[in-house]
Amino acid sequence: VQGQPESSRVPASAMTTTEEMKVKLILHCENGSPPYLTPALLATCFPSTSRAVNDHLVFGIAVRDSCVTPVYKPKEKKPRKTKQKNKSNPPSRQGSTVSDGVSSVASMSGAKPTGYTFTGRPLHDDLIIPREYNVLACPSFDLIDDGKSGNNGTKAATATHKELSLVTPRGHQKLTPSLYREVVEKMEAPTSIGLYDEASEENAKRNAKSVERTKLWLEEWTNSSAEMEKVTGHKSKLWAPIVGGADLTLRLDCIENATRQSSVCGVALIGIHHIADRQARIALLQSCSKAIPKSMPRAVLVANSIGEIMDAAQNNGGVQYIGSSLPALLARSRRALILDLFGWRNEEGKDQQDGDGRPKKRPRTEGGARSTKDGCICLEDKAFARDTAPFVEGCPCLACTEHKRAYLHHLINAKELLSEILLFVHNLHHLLSLLQEMTDATAIGKQMEFVQHIERQLQS
């Protein structure tokens, strides 16, 4: 992470980090861009040369909110009739041309969208994501969540064997497998997740049909892969979506179909977070991971809490990529992550502090209050009105090095957007630090000690 010397971490002689050990965050990008970050702020706070960014950050682009464009149909305007005083002298052709030109411009400028469709937007030009950052494209992070986040009365996504009706900021829009493939190729996304259907847990019949459609659409992608590559000249690595809800049989059927496809390079488990029971969720992750070849990267597209991230990332989950919008969600609720990420070393009887400013104790507020069970403090609380401490002592992020908790409390009360920007920068930095520390712990065989250290903080 920026500001943290490599020498302060696990010695290279004691660490053999492989790609399988690295846990990466798929940050949900809204409307095709990282939340709150301008290109300049992104380069300053999260440079691509940083180890944490290069090893642990992937920008996730959802087609449902990033590639919806209006369709215009010019309104045909009838030629305006003019009264002629002298019928023997008709108006000149030049005057008619000017009049026609004005009418044409007026009709185009007054044109209204007749509908919306999906159009591929180049990542590095239109969506303004620098080329040196890792990017993954998907139809949506979760179809069920899309319906819940829409306006009151918004129905969840529906599907047939030919198309999927996605919930977008512009209402329901139809997306066919061929159109989705075309959009992804125009985006020039290096990695993309196939089109999928998803059903709620209560409807077993609908759940089974969603698996059938997902398998069918995946086969259509693989069959047209060579032809599309010749047309566009670009080849995106395909990850197969794995659906089926809490039904392990359906999930395994989906995995078996995916592993048979030669063009599939990885898998993404969809809707795991909808399983409320933690033990059932972990058991499903374990069973799915055993059925997936070790050479294939595995992803969980949505994790809504630190606990869900830890469950997916540790060995029993076996997932290397975890999708989340947690940094933005916490920023909008005025909360900052303050987990002690390095105390597990001291619990092993080793004093690893070497002047880098790493905290040995859990951060406290001025009044002695600890963080809540989600590992956060809410800076909207009046207790922080005169707190001159940073969010986390020794944290090198922009918010902690330049500002204090009292200042953030003031920005929140003043309803300044800057408060959310600083909170987002800190929360993303803290989450990347967590994943980097977990990777280091795994490399020296201490992953369980690290997981237990974090879980104790979430339970207290």
Image: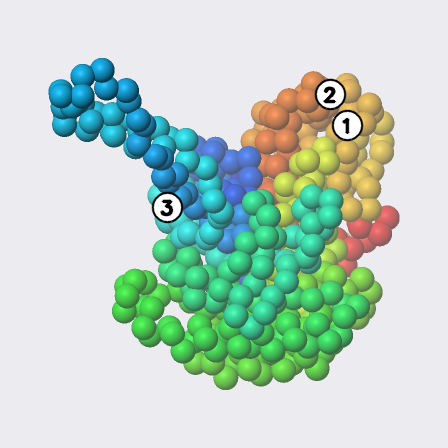
Image coords of residue 11 (percent x, y): 54, 56
User: Callout 1: helix, strand or loop?
Assistant: loop
Which residue does the numbered mark 1 point to in the structure image?
A: 380
Alpha-carbon distance for marks 1 and 3? 37 Å
Can you say whether 243 is above or below 432 in the image?
below
Amino acid at dot 1: Glu
User: Callout 2: helix, strand or loop?
Assistant: helix
Horizontally, residue 384 falls left or right of residue 71, namely right
User: Callout 3: helix, strand or loop?
Assistant: loop
- Label 2 crowding class (10 Å Cα cut-off): few <14, some 14-19, many 20+? some
The color scheme shown is rainbow
Horizontally, residue 380 falls left or right of residue 128, namely right
Q: Earlier in the sequence, mark 1 or mark 3?
A: 3
Which residue does the numbered mark 3 point to in the structure image?
A: 124
Which residue does the numbered mark 2 point to in the structure image?
A: 413
Tell me whether the residue at label 1 lies in contact with that at label 3, contact meaning CB atoms closer than 8 angstroms: no
Amino acid at dot 3: His
- Label 3 crowding class (10 Å Cα cut-off): few <14, some 14-19, many 20+? some
- Tell us which disc is closer to us: 1 or 3: 3
Tell me whether the residue at label 2 lies in contact with that at label 1, contact meaning CB atoms closer than 8 angstroms: yes
Horizontally, residue 91 falls left or right of residue 40, namely left
Q: Earlier in the sequence, mark 2 or mark 1?
A: 1
Alpha-carbon distance for marks 3 and 2? 37 Å
